[in-house]
Image (cartoon, rainbow, N blue to C red):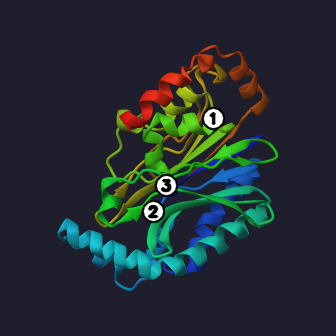
């Protein structure tokens, strides 16, 4: 099977149609390569803030951190329902047009009076299959009151079992460990890292988690600069060392950490499952020890 990871350049769109065409263009590239599953980045709603008059000036203005948090929360609460409608229409349509599974990336929108950063998965018929709330918030997200989820879901697709925790969730090895123990073959991580690109800082996420947990990994990235907001990252597809041609854990990765890109790569799910069955390290677990001490440690 073939999968696709998108690298999406962050630019403010002035209409929902412009936004849709940007996302559709990336999906079309993936479809031409034969991808059955495509993943979009975290915070894929941000380009839609271009719909607000004078947004560039507002984003450029400096303010106190507590004021910024309050303003961000107010904007997300106000615009969230409209953003969610455009998001659902965009990615369900893309899934249906190209007859592929689409993990549409994550959006921060209100739910029952609280803000959550949630990613959604659509099937080839355009219908929603399921969702995943971000499990670990960043300090910036905590500043505007983001709530987090408390359960990691694994979805059974015809060709593989898939989980898609969000960005910061990949910082912790437990996320991927739980995903694998629940049967995941592929773990998708949509990211939006607001920082200068650094190889070793970027390495803290999906690559080591894939090696520890023996799953395939897909990383989709929001990149680009708008006003004082600067996102970097490389979209890519990753696998355990022994299942990659150069034994480096990288199936394929974007050449640069900026600009639109679509990374497609073939994955052999049966080879991964055989590899895990033969892996002695995966069987080296002390469940009694974990249950006794982990709850205290965390």
Q: Earlier in the sequence, mark 2 or mark 3?
A: 2
Q: How far apart are marks 2 and 1 (CA)?
A: 32 Å
Going 47% across and 41% down the picture, which residue do you hit? 170
**Which secondary structure lies at badge 3?**
loop
Residue 134 position within the rendered picture, expressed as x and y whole percent measured from the top left: 49, 55
Left or right side of 46 for 3: right
Query: Would you call the spot at circle 2 few (<14 residues within 10 Å), some (14-19), or many (20 or more)?
Result: many
Total marks in image: 3
Q: Nearer the viewer, residue 14 or 280?
A: 280
Q: Name the residue under label 2.
A: 10
Residue 182 position within the rendered picture, expressed as x and y whole percent measured from the top left: 66, 39
Left or right side of 175 for 127: right
Q: Mark 3 points at which residue?
A: 134
Q: Name the residue under label 1.
A: 180
Going 82% across and 46% down the picture, which residue do you hit? 158
**Which secondary structure lies at badge 1?**
helix
Q: Earlier in the sequence, mark 2 or mark 1?
A: 2
Going 75% across and 33% down the picture, which residue do you hit? 269
Contact, mark 2 vs mark 3 (Cβ under 8 Å): no
Residue furthest top as drawn: 280
Q: Is residue 19 above or below residue 5?
A: below
Q: Quadrant of residue 22?
A: bottom right
Q: Earlier in the sequence, mark 1 or mark 3?
A: 3
Contact, mark 2 vs mark 1 (Cβ under 8 Å): no
Mark 2 vs mark 1: in front? 1
Q: Quadrant of residue 19?
A: bottom right
């Amino acid at each position: 099977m073939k999968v696709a990871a998108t690298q999406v350049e962050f630019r403010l769109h002035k209409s929902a149609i412009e936004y849709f065409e940007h996302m559709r263009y990336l999906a079309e590239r993936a479809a031409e390569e034969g991808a059955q599953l495509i993943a979009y980045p975290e915070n894929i709603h941000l380009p839609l803030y271009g719909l607000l008059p004078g947004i560039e000036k507002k984003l450029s203005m400096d303010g106190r951190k507590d004021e910024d948090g309050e303003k961000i929360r107010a904007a997300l609460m106000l615009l969230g329902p409209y953003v969610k409608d455009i998001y659902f229409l965009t990615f369900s349509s893309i899934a249906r047009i190209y007859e592929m599974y689409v993990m549409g990336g994550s959006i921060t929108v209100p739910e029952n009076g609280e803000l959550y950063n949630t990613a959604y998965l659509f099937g080839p018929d355009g219908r929603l299959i399921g969702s995943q709330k971000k499990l670990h918030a960043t300090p910036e997200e905590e500043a505007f009151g983001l709530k987090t989820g408390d359960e990691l879901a694994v979805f059974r697709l015809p060709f593989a079992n898939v989980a898609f925790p969000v960005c910061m969730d990949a910082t912790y090895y437990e996320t991927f460990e739980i995903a694998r123990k629940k049967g995941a073959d592929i773990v998708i991580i949509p990211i939006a890292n607001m920082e200068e690109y650094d190889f070793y800082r970027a390495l803290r996420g999906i690559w080591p988690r894939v090696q520890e947990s023996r799953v395939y990994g897909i990383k989709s990235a929001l990149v680009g600069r708008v006003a004082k907001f600067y996102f970097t990252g490389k979209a890519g597809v990753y696998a355990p060392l022994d299942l990659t041609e150069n034994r480096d854990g990288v199936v394929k990765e974007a050449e640069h950490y900026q600009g639109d890109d679509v990374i497609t790569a073939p994955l052999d799910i049966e080879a991964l499952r055989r590899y895990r069955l033969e892996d002695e390290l995966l069987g080296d677990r002390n469940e009694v020890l974990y249950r006794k001490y982990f709850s205290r440690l965390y």
